[in-house]
Image: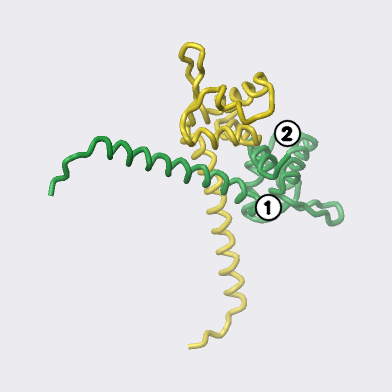
Chain colours: A yellow, B green
Amino acid sequence: MTELDAVFHALADPTRRAVVNRLIDGAAAVKQLSAPFEMGLPAFLKHLAVLETSGLIRSEKRGRVRTCHLNADRLATAEDWLVEQRVLWQGRADRLAAFVESQNPREHTS
Amino acid sequence: MTELDAVFHALADPTRRAVVNRLIDGAAAVKQLSAPFEMGLPAFLKHLAVLETSGLIRSEKRGRVRTCHLNADRLATAEDWLVEQRVLWQGRADRLAAFVESQNPREHTS
């Protein structure tokens, strides 16, 4: 599984996206993070494990409290790929438009 | 499954990302699309089905040939979400930097 596979997979779930969004406000303990979600802790911990495997979050344990942090660089990996596709797509659209224009030259008013 | 779930899920695979990237160059028949991949047609068709479910591609059949097209708008859905997170993240980083600065005012040389 490549880094991109893991990041896109991690983002393909509303709970995991909500956790990413929450961690933008700052690090949080697992208990805080899980509070808004109506699911059992084991299910929630599985979502955190998917996020951590993807590198989107990291966590550390002090005593009995595990705290999660966002790794925003990993979001950039996914954004960069999408931007690359968009730029290619726009380039093709521009070339198509130029071609159509060259086949149907319009009169320019001066 | 929301639209974002489906789009991120579809992008979480190298074959499916390669198909998206290929379709930027223009529509292509399934046979053309599958040629670069060392996998059986049934496996490849499953990947196309995931892409089509997500709305990233659409296809149409004429006679015995099924042609696939990219729906670039759907890529934008994913990019928009990532951009939103990045903007929030940068906003927080800027506020943190301003706070740190306010606590440790430096002498400005003039």
Q: Residue furthest bottom?
A: A110
Q: Please give the residue where the numbered disc 1 appears in the rendered image.
A: B70
Q: Mark 2 falls within which chain?
A: B
Q: Residue furthest top?
A: A63
Indicate which disc residue A110 carries.
Answer: none
Q: Residue at x 51, y 28 (%)?
A: A57
Hey, which quadrant is residue B39 in on the image? top right
B80 or B10, which is in the foreground? B80
- Name the quadrant of the N terminus of chain A: top right
Hey, which quadrant is residue B42 in on the image? top right
B80 or A62, which is in the foreground? A62
Residue A56 at x, y = what percent? 52, 31
Q: Please give the residue where the numbered disc 2 appears in the rendered image.
A: B39
Q: Is residue A4 visible?
A: yes
Question: Which kind of residue does numbered mark 1 sit on?
Answer: Leu
Q: Residue at x 68, y 37 (%)?
A: B37
